[in-house]
């Protein structure tokens, strides 16, 4: 059994070394905290490596209320107008426009990149081709016909226009 006693003695020696190492680690950790506080009061961060991104615990900006942004425009507005008003990236504004269009809150004016609030009368009414054609026909019918010159009537010639 001398081998078993020797193994137990070795285990207790290793346990005491681990305890000493843990005690030393706690002392070093406390020392680091003290120095980090000193560095942060002097204006540093206390971290040796810088982390990217938003620090933990910091609140993000408020969410944009797109209904209020759109309501701020009276007539038609473009994507660039929305970018300026919302202070968001163009890609974000494009996504918001698609969502607003699908929700029926805005509609396209017919011009590329221009929109208006739904339910607001457009600045210039859209005219259909049929209405324009009817107006042209009405003008032709209402226009007085030019008389045929007397010389052409006496000779029996008729001018076609």
Image (cartoon, rainbow, N blue to C red):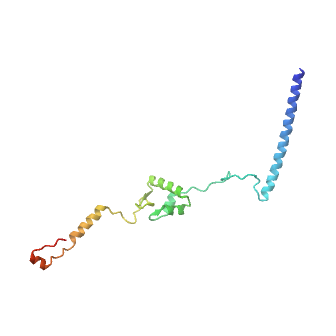
Q: Residue at x 24, y 66 (%)?
A: 137
Residue lying at the far top of the rendered structure? 1
Number of numbered discs: 0
Give residue 161's position: percent from left, percent from top: 19, 71
- Asked if residue 83 lies left or right of residue 7, the reply is left
Residue at 47% of width from left, 62% of height from top?
Answer: 78
Residue 133 versus residue 117: which sits nearer the camera?
133
158 relative to 63 in the view: left or right: left
Asked which quadrant contains residue 101, the reply is: bottom left
Asked whether 158 or 98 is in front, the reply is 158
Q: Position of residue 66 (x, y in %)?
A: 51, 57
Task: Residue lying at the far right in this picture: please name it.
Answer: 2
Q: Quadrant of the N terminus?
A: top right
Q: Is residue 104 left or right of residue 142?
A: right
Q: Residue at x 51, y 60 (%)?
A: 68
* Residue toward you, 115 or 145: 145
In the rendered image of this protein, does residue 144 appear above or below residue 81? below
**Would you say 59 lies left or right of 2 here?**
left
Q: 45 above or below 7?
A: below
Residue 107, percent across and down? 43, 58
């Amino acid at each position: 059994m001398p081998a078993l006693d020797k193994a137990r003695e070795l285990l207790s020696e290793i346990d005491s070394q681990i305890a000493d190492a843990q005690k030393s680690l706690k002392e070093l950790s406390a020392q680091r905290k003290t120095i980090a506080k000193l560095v942060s009061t002097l204006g540093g961060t206390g971290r040796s490596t810088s982390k990217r991104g938003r620090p933990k615990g910091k609140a993000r900006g408020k969410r944009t209320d797109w209904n209020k942004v759109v309501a701020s425009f009276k007539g038609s507005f473009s994507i660039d107008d929305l970018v300026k008003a919302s202070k968001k990236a163009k890609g974000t504004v494009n996504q918001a426009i698609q969502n607003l269009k699908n929700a029926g809150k805005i509609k396209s004016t017919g011009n590329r990149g221009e929109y208006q609030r739904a339910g607001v009368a457009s600045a210039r009414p859209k005219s259909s081709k049929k209405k324009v054609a009817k107006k042209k026909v009405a003008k032709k019918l209402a226009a007085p016909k030019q008389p045929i010159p007397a010389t052409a009537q006496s000779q029996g010639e008729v001018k076609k226009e």
